Amino acid sequence: MSAASPPSNSRYAARPLDFAGLNTYPLAQRPSKVSASDLSRPCPPGASLRDFFASLPNILAVKELRAAAAAVRAARDQGRAVIAGFGGHVIKCGLGPILIDLMARGYLTAFACNGSSAIHDFEIALVGATSEDVDATLGSGAFGGAEETGQGINAACAAAAADGIGLGEAVGRWLEAAQPPYAAQSVFAQAYRRRVPVTVHVAVGTDITHIHPTAAGAAIGAATYHDFRLLCGLARELHDGGVYLNFGSAVILPEVFLKAVTTVRNLGYPLTNFTTVNFDFIQHYRPLTNVTRRPVAGGTGRGIALTGHHELLIPLFAAAISETDG
């Protein structure tokens, strides 16, 4: 017992460990993960967005955000693919124009989405509104009965099957022909005009268009299967510097993307040295496993997970790409 310890009246046989011989070292010699240069700086009134990004602490999620933005910029500069996968909530949160802008400036080279994404984007283009109040309509059985949505999407499915194209291209073509009043805010319409591929990955029974009388299972299957094969072709271009972004799809796209990765590798195409990024307000099992871990395991790339509300995180990411460029 050290001289500094008071006498013990404990009835325990065990005694506290004596720390008198414990080794220490100078603080300045210790490797530390945070330094003064990493700390945040107050952002003054009237500061630019570039100044705002420069003021952020270079720690944890900020470092990951910067790395993800840098990967997208590098991919564009090197002519590599940047595929943006997105779920329906991304469109419902008003982020279609952000995706369109990134595409128009060459940062996004292709899109992949689920069936609900196509529906919400289609409705925005057609009438400038989407996102049905399910609680108000489910009780009467009226939920999902929007006539134009069912007719238009199912007509696109039928045309896709007949013409040997995918559902994403067919929806874009339908919108281009219809010239709806809000086409400028539609990812599908704007991508079609720019010849940027959009793939739609449908799970039968999950979308309101599947309960319409015009729905045809064979056409839906043919159109979405074409798009899966197309996504596999696009995924080849991720090799050596490409980026796959998963914006808010918790189940469908992570599963589809994983199958695309294994298909590409099975066919003998190289698929290494690429970046995957998952954006969501909750980090779910499938995106973390099937997007940020498995595809880049074994030193074949880098996976990044960023957590936050879509309506805040995705515009912040888009701004980081452009405002920190150069």
Image: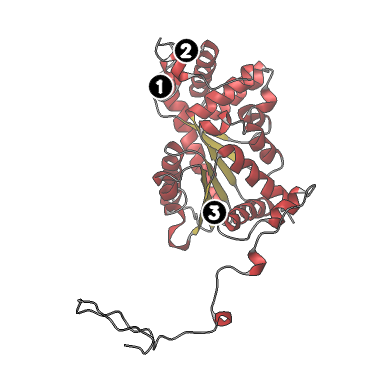
**At numbered mark 1, what does the secondary structure look like: helix, strand or loop?**
helix
In front here: 63 or 254? Answer: 63
The answer to the question of whether label 3 and label 2 lie on touching residues, with beta carbons closer than 8 A, is: no
**At numbered mark 3, what does the secondary structure look like: helix, strand or loop?**
strand
| Above or below for 293 versus 115 | below
Three-letter amino acid code at the position of disc 3: Thr
CA–CA distance in space, label 1 to label 3: 35 Å
Q: Which residue is mark 2?
A: 145
Density class for disc 3 (Cα within 10 Å; few <14, some 14-19, many ≥20) is: many
In this view of the protein, can residue 144 be seen by the observer? no
**At numbered mark 2, what does the secondary structure look like: helix, strand or loop?**
loop
Residue 157 horizontal side relative to residue 6, left or right: right
Q: Which residue is mark 1?
A: 218
Between disc 1 and disc 2, the foreground one is 2
Residue 292, image x, y percentages: 47, 52
| Type of colouring | secondary structure
Density class for disc 1 (Cα within 10 Å; few <14, some 14-19, many ≥20) is: few
Q: Residue at x 43, y 86 (%)?
A: 23
Residue 80 horizontal side relative to residue 298, left or right: right
Three-letter amino acid code at the position of disc 2: Gly
CA–CA distance in space, label 1 to label 2: 21 Å
The label on residue 120 is: none
In front here: 14 or 164? Answer: 14
Residue 110, image x, y percentages: 59, 39
| Above or below for 199 versus 49 | above
Q: Which residue is mark 3?
A: 275
Q: Residue at x 47, y 84 (%)?
A: 24
Three-letter amino acid code at the position of disc 1: Ala
Mark 3 or mark 2, earlier in chain: 2
Q: The C terminus lies in which quarter of the figure?
A: bottom right
CA–CA distance in space, label 3 to label 2: 40 Å
